[in-house]
Amino acid sequence: MKKQAITLALIVAGTAVFAHGGVKDPDVMNRMMGMSELAKQLKVIGAMAKGETGFDAAASNAALAKMAEEASYIPTLFGPEATDPKSEALPVIWQEFDKFSARARDLQRVTGELAGTIESRADLGAAMKQVGQACGACHSAYRK
C-alpha cells in the first residue's frame, strides 16, 4: 500500500506540468498552479521515501508544511465554477462543494499535523501513506 501511495503521488506530480499548456481560463490556471505546487512538494517527499534522493528531515518537514499551506487555498481556488478543456476538475466539485472543501481541509490537517514530526525515512514512509490517502480521497471523486 505504501508503494502504491508513493507511486500515485509521483504520477500526479509528473503529469501536472503537462496539464497547463493551452489553458485559457485564468481561474483554472490559478487552480492548476496551486495543484502543481502541491505536486512539487509531494515529489520532494516521494523521492525521499522511495530512496531516489537522500533523506533530509528538514526538507521533508518543510515540504509537508508547504503542502498544508497550499491545501488551505484549495477551497478559494475552486470557489469560482470555472471550466477549461484542459481542466481535470469534475463538475461535481461545485455540486458537493462542502464535501470537496472538507477533503481539502483534511489534506491541510494531515500535512499540517505531520509537518515537524518527520525524523527518519520510516517516519516519511508512514506519512506518505496518510498524505496519499488524503490526496486520493479527493482525486477519486473530483478529478478526471
Image (spheres, helix red, strand yellow):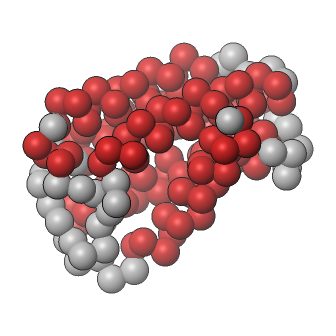
Does the rendering let one see residue 26? Answer: yes
Look at 56% across and 37% down and name the residue there: 132
Does the rendering let one see residue 65? Answer: no
Horizontal arrangement in the rendering, residue 53 relative to residue 113 (left or right): right
Residue 125: quadrant of the picture = top right
Q: Position of residue 28 (x, y in %)?
A: 25, 63
* View extreme (bottom): residue: 22
Q: Position of residue 58 (x, y in %)?
A: 75, 30
Residue 130: quadrant of the picture = top right
Query: In the image shown, does 100 or 115 lie closer to the viewer?
Result: 100
Horizontal arrangement in the rendering, residue 124 relative to residue 24 (left or right): right
Q: Quadrant of the C terminus?
A: bottom left
Look at 37% across and 40% down and name the residue there: 138
The mark tally for this picture is: 0
Q: Is residue 27 above or below residue 101?
A: below
Query: In the image shown, does 122 or 41 lie closer to the viewer?
Result: 122
Query: In the image shown, does 11 or 38 lie closer to the viewer?
Result: 11
Q: Quadrant of the N terminus?
A: top right
* View extreme (front): residue: 1
Q: Position of residue 69 (x, y in %)?
A: 44, 33
Look at 66% across and 27% down and name the residue there: 127
Query: In the image shown, does 134 or 40 lie closer to the viewer?
Result: 134
Horizontal arrangement in the rendering, residue 125 relative to residue 11 (left or right): right
Q: Is residue 6 above or below residue 14?
A: above
Q: Position of residue 66 (x, y in %)?
A: 53, 37
Look at 74% across and 29% down and name the residue there: 124
